[in-house]
Image (cartoon, rainbow, N blue to C red):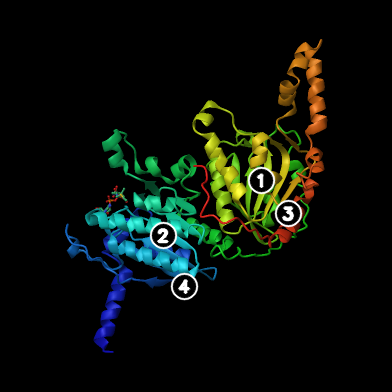
Amino acid sequence: MTTDRFDELLRIKEEVQRGPDPKATERQHAKGKLTARERIGLLVDKGSFTEVEALRRHRAVGFGLEAKRPYTDGVVTGWGTVEGRTVFVYAHDFRIFGGALGEAHAQKIHKLMDMAISAGAPLVSLNDGAGARIQEGVSALAGYGGIFRRNTRASGVIPQISVMLGPCAGGAAYSPALTDFVFAVRDVSQMFITGPDVVQAVTGEQVTQNELGGADVHAGVSGVAHFVYDDEETCLAEVRYLLSLLPSNNRELPPRVRGEDPADRLGDALLDLVPADGNRSYDIRAVIEEVVDDGEFMEVHASWAPNIVCGLARLDGHVVGVVANQPLSMAGALDIRASEKGARFVQFCDAFSIPLVTLVDVPGFLPGVDQEHDGIIRRGAKLLYAYCNATVPRISVVLRKAYGGAYIVMDSRSIGADVALAWPTNEIAVMGAEGAANVVFRREIAAARDPDATRAEKIEEYRRELVHPYYAAERGLVDDVIDPRETRSVLCRTMSMLVTKDVDLPHRKHGNPPQ
Ligand SMILES: CC(=O)SCCNC(=O)CCNC(=O)[C@H](O)C(C)(C)COP(=O)(O)OP(=O)(O)OC[C@H]1O[C@@H](n2cnc3c(N)ncnc32)[C@H](O)[C@@H]1OP(=O)(O)O
């Protein structure tokens, strides 16, 4: 090959790496944002990134596009490794057309998604884009259609993670909504279907980008974001950590990594962490951290629906999904948000062979007109549906109380828990003794010479007969009543037995979950 050809190649490659004019890079940095390549560098193992279609350019015409045909067309696509395992990644380059998606840009993403699905490796998108490229009209819209279709096809096949690193509008917000996890960074990420200008034009509401769709809005109010961090570096390090807990695809098991924590370690602290009085609150996260390997718990949706806690941890090296009621928030009652949060998490774990451990301390579903009118029947049913559908190993432990429908939903034996355990202090019943006595013995209490004494007697009778774990244990609805200090060792032992669980389901195209 001639030197000229080498020089040409070097010149083009250099132009690709440099990106558009340096002022655009300065503007990106001035906003406290990294460039697409800097981000990829933080995400994948050093030196492992292989780019595809770096030389791609659009062929669109009109609106001056002919004169502006930068390499990459505004998205960097390729694959690398995270802790040695292959991961596919695409990153919008906001410096080019504001990261907006045109036909060529979309086709690059389509190709990468197809590669990720056939290779059976996770896909991470680093989003910093203004949605459909306005100058390319319907070609841009069709490009998004192709991404949405592939997101949906890949759902439950490979893990898909979206990291929001800029103002993401329209399709750039919808594609992440179809993926498994959304990461956001404070003061950097915004997500909205239509930006503040359109909102003002249509509704008259004046709102900033952050107020409309900033990281904390989506992490705490809308529930769109699962994780939120203060800076891009921490965010991308946490994406790496999450990937280390996940299998590459739905045919693999999550990687087992045994640490130093002995599987038979006793949890003496549990006796103090959980007050025996069922009305006193405590932080369930402290209980989870006491039970799992090395106290490491990656909480999902920490700021949204805090009355249920969901997250990933390890037990004797096996990755598990933990779902637990949080007595610190609304006494741990289940409401619409908690049900939706739990359902999505259970569904994710089931799709990717992650066993479920459910820690139950639930007074019931939250009563209220708002909840009923907002559809707690159909939306609460999502959690029930997700558990009933899950074929991964499932262990539940009732810590203190489990009442009514909420007992059934929180992975009771009757809906398919493989092993159901209970602490000796717990109460499993249709309702608490006071409520039960008032309903069942109402007439007797009213007719009594001393109604208060009779009520107290009946409450005690109900409590003695029904409100203890042995009623459930005698009926096989609880497999064992355990010493709370042995929770970790029993869970580790049981998990080791269950990892080979195999279930055949009747043939169907797909279910029809409540919406
Ligand atoms: C299916 C769908 O996706 S429909 C949605 C279509 N997208 C939209 O409606 C979003 C329109 N864009 C916006 O609202 C804003 O640009 C935001 C909120 C995304 C970003 O705002 P800012 O951070 O202030 O950036 P700014 O508006 O300066 O845009 C940066 C550059 O991207 C360009 N750009 C922004 N959006 C688009 C777009 N959708 N298509 C093409 N170019 C765009 C801007 O013209 C600007 O170009 P320049 O640097 O050459 O002047």
On screen, residue 47 versus residue 198, left or right, reads right
Residue sitting nearer the eye, 159 or 350: 350
* Label 4 vs label 2, nearer the camera: 2
Q: Are marks 1 and 4 in contact (CB under 8 Å)?
A: no
Q: Where the N terminus falls, by quadrant?
A: bottom left
Residue 333 in sight from this viewpoint: yes
Q: Which residue is mark 4?
A: 48
* Label 4 vs label 3, nearer the camera: 3
Q: Residue furthest bottom?
A: 1
Q: Which residue is mark 3?
A: 491
Tag 3: residue type? Leu
Residue sitting nearer the eye, 126 or 414: 414
Question: Reading the chain from its start, which is encountered first: label 1 or label 2?
Answer: 2
Tag 1: residue type? Ile
Question: Reading the chain from its start, which is encountered first: label 2 or label 3?
Answer: 2
Tag 4: residue type? Ser
Q: Are marks 1 and 2 in contact (CB under 8 Å)?
A: no
Q: CA distance from mark 1 to mark 3?
A: 19 Å
Question: Reading the chain from its start, which is encountered first: label 4 or label 3?
Answer: 4
Q: Is mark 3 within 8 Å of ligand 1?
A: no
- x and y percentages locating residue 242 in the rendered image: 55, 58
Query: Residue at (61%, 56%) from the top-left corner?
Result: 505
On screen, residue 269 versus residue 236, left or right, reads right
Among the 4 quarters of the image, the one containing residue 279: top right
Is 452 rendered above or below residue 243?
above
* Label 2 vs label 3, nearer the camera: 2
Q: CA distance from mark 2 to mark 3?
A: 37 Å
Q: Which residue is mark 2?
A: 150
